[in-house]
Image (spheres, helix red, strand yellow):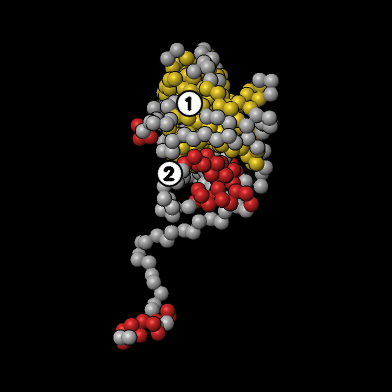
């Protein structure tokens, strides 16, 4: 045996200094510990590197994904981000998974929606709300890079003898762009229900401004019943009140019953002797999701907007939620009230997705 070979055999592992990562090199995190019992194998399949085995048979993908999202619903830590659709985007589409659709005898069958198949995969309860996880896949034979995602839709559960329960928010999984979660009021879905998707066939967005050179807060204009027209639809402003602490706006739609809207508002002005000020809706406040939740506002036929006075226009803080005095008289200059309306016109007939799932309890 040569001297070099002998030294290699006798060398201690402590002879070498510990390896160090290069500056800026990111450490690959360990996979989270999967839940115990029956879901272990399915969750490991989702977390496993695709290089561990030869290309797998995708026929079990639905079951594995179901285990993952159900685990997320039980509080095992899957990240959920805001889908800026509320309940659908304009011309933008949502990315879909590239897995061809598969069949399963354990899950209700999918429905074709906007060039993809959509299927309810899991259900869970959290915070007194019901959540349904929906996943989409491209149709067999289609090229995933050329297929758009689910169009904007109005989502409704049909339960029991036909009672309808509308979704109150919609979320997406950043790591699974083909999946999204619908939030509903707590609803009994035992025995099976239907998820109705009314696809958006037209979307119009417009901003309406009311400007005044000078006025005084509290301010009650524009007059009640002011109309804003978007195509064939009219938005009726029932009440506007702006004041030093923010304000309130209520509205409703008049016209096409297949149309719904998401309405936001805000105002800028200068307080005499003080300087520039701003009023925003609740979801524009700093750390708004800590109080208002992460889901976007659903489209509706009527609604109200609660406005808040920012404590600092350039660097607002959480104090904005409690800033100002609603009754204080304020001399105002250069007031600009902006009401933003995104109007959705939905199909008259829904796409029906069968839902027959066991609801995971809050854990």
The residue at which mark 1 appears reads as: 112
Query: Which mark sits nearer the N-terminus, 1 or 2?
Result: 1
**Residue 62: x %, y % from top left:** 52, 39
**Residue 359: x %, y % from top left:** 65, 38
Judged from the image, the secondary structure of the residue bearing numbered disc 1 is strand
Quadrant of the rendered structure where residue 33 is? bottom right
Quadrant of the rendered structure where residue 106 is? top right
- The front one of 250 and 191 is 191
Horizontal relation, residue 144 to residue 243: left or right: left
* Residue 222 visible, this angle: no
Specify the label residue 239 is tagged with: none
Judged from the image, the secondary structure of the residue bearing numbered disc 2 is loop
Work out which residue is located at the far front of the displayed protein and give it.
1
The residue at which mark 2 appears reads as: 314
Q: How many marks?
A: 2
User: What's the residue at 37%, 61% (across, down)?
Assistant: 25
Q: CA distance from mark 1 to mark 2?
A: 47 Å
* Residue 59 visible, this angle: yes
Q: Using a 10 Å C-alpha cutoff, classify the residue at mark 2 as few (fewer than 14 neighbours), some (14 to 19) or many (20 or more).
A: few
Above or below residue 232? Residue 298 is: below
Placement of the N terminus among the 4 image quadrants: bottom left
User: What's the residue at 46%, 22% (across, down)?
Assistant: 200
Quadrant of the rendered structure where residue 107 is? top right
User: What's the residue at 45%, 15% (across, down)?
Assistant: 229
Horizontal relation, residue 160 to residue 241: left or right: right
- The front one of 268 and 235 is 235
* Tag 1 and tag 2, C-beta contact below 8 Å: no
């Amino acid at each position: 045996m040569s001297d070099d070979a002998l030294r290699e055999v006798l060398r201690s592992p402590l002879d070498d200094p510990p390896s160090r990562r290069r500056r800026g090199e990111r450490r690959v995190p360990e996979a989270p510990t999967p839940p115990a019992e029956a879901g272990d194998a399915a969750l490991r399949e989702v977390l496993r590197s695709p290089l561990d085995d030869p290309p797998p048979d995708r026929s079990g993908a639905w079951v594995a994904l179901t285990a993952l999202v159900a685990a997320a619903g039980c509080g095992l830590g899957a990240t959920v981000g805001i889908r800026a659709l509320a309940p659908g985007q304009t011309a933008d589409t949502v990315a879909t998974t590239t897995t061809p659709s598969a069949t399963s005898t354990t899950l209700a069958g999918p429905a074709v929606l906007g060039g993809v198949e959509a299927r309810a995969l899991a259900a869970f309860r959290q915070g007194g709300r019901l959540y349904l996880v929906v996943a989409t896949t491209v149709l067999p034979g289609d090229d995933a890079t050329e297929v758009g995602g689910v169009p904007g839709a109005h989502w409704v559960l049909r339960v029991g003898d036909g009672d309808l329960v509308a979704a109150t928010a919609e979320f997406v999984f950043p790591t699974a762009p083909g999946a999204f979660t619908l939030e509903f009021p707590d609803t009994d879905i035992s025995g099976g229900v239907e998820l109705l998707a009314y696809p958006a066939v037209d979307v119009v967005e417009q901003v309406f401004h009311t400007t005044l050179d000078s006025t005084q807060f509290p301010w009650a204009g524009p007059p009640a019943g002011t109309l804003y027209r978007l195509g064939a639809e009219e938005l009726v402003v029932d009440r506007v009140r702006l004041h030093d602490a923010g304000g309130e706006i209520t509205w409703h739609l008049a016209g096409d019953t297949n149309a719904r809207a998401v309405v936001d508002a805000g105002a800028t002005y200068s307080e005499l002797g003080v300087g520039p000020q701003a009023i925003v809706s609740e979801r524009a406040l700093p750390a708004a999701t800590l109080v208002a939740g992460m889901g976007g506002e659903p489209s509706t036929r009527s609604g109200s907007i609660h406005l808040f006075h920012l404590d600092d226009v350039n660097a607002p803080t959480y104090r904005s939620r409690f800033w100002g005095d609603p009754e204080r008289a304020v001399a105002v200059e250069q007031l600009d009230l902006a009401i933003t309306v995104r109007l959705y016109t939905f199909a008259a007939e829904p796409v029906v997705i069968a839902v027959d799932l066991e609801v995971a309890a809050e854990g």
